[in-house]
Image (cartoon, grey):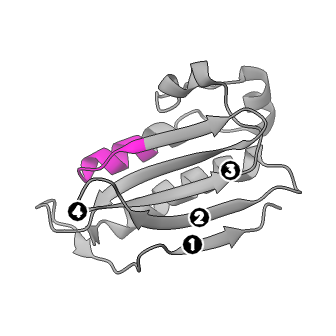
Amino acid sequence: MFCDWKAVHQALCNLLENAIKYTPDSGTITVGTRPDTRAGFVRFYVRDTGIGIPKEDLPRLFERFYRVDKARSRELGGTGLGLAIVKHLARSHGGDVAVESEPGSGSTFSFTLPDHDNGIGAHPVSFSDHDEAPVAAS
């Protein structure tokens, strides 16, 4: 895989921070990779069993400063830029972002990156297929 590893680190940190904020202590957070449906891409994902997001908010989640619950977001902190940064980092590598969510059941946020040199000057990074690791939500 060819990418700016610092960008991948930043994107995963942003997704993990959100998952930790919105997942109860008894919930679970899983981080992993899998081959994408588009040939030549790998999908990174963060899945949680948190509060979930209403369907009507999903299309706007990756906009700068957009927040689903303004009051709760102020309480938990943040700038409303994390998901927009993930989108920018993924697209700057030729990838994309996605979200699946069900209120009360949790969310899966993901982004794709090419597994080949697409000419952006990135460096090779090695990941095995279907890597997955649980993360403690504390």
Q: Residue at x 60, y 34 (%)?
A: 79
Query: The magenta stretch spans which residues?
Result: 86-97
15 to the left or right of 126: right
For marks 3 and 1 on the same chain, the one whose residue lies earlier in the sequence: 3
What whole-number distance in Å separates the C-alpha atoms at marks 3 and 2? 10 Å
Question: Is residue 38 part of the magenta span, yes or no?
Answer: no
Q: Amino acid at mark 1?
A: Glu
The residue at which mark 1 appears reads as 132
Q: How far separated are the C-alphas under marks 2 and 1?
A: 6 Å
Indicate which disc, 4 or 3, sits on the residue closer to the N terminus: 3
State which tag comes first along the sequence, 4 or 2: 2
To which quarter of the image does residue 56 belong?
Answer: top right
| Residue at the image position 62 percent from the left and 26 percent from the top | 67
Residue 90 magenta-highlighted: yes
Q: Identify the mark at residue 43; answer none if there is no mark.
A: none
Where in the figure is residue 117, as x and y percent of width and height? 15, 67
Q: Nearer the viewer, mark 3 or mark 2?
A: 2
Identify the residue shown where x is 10% and y is 61%.
119
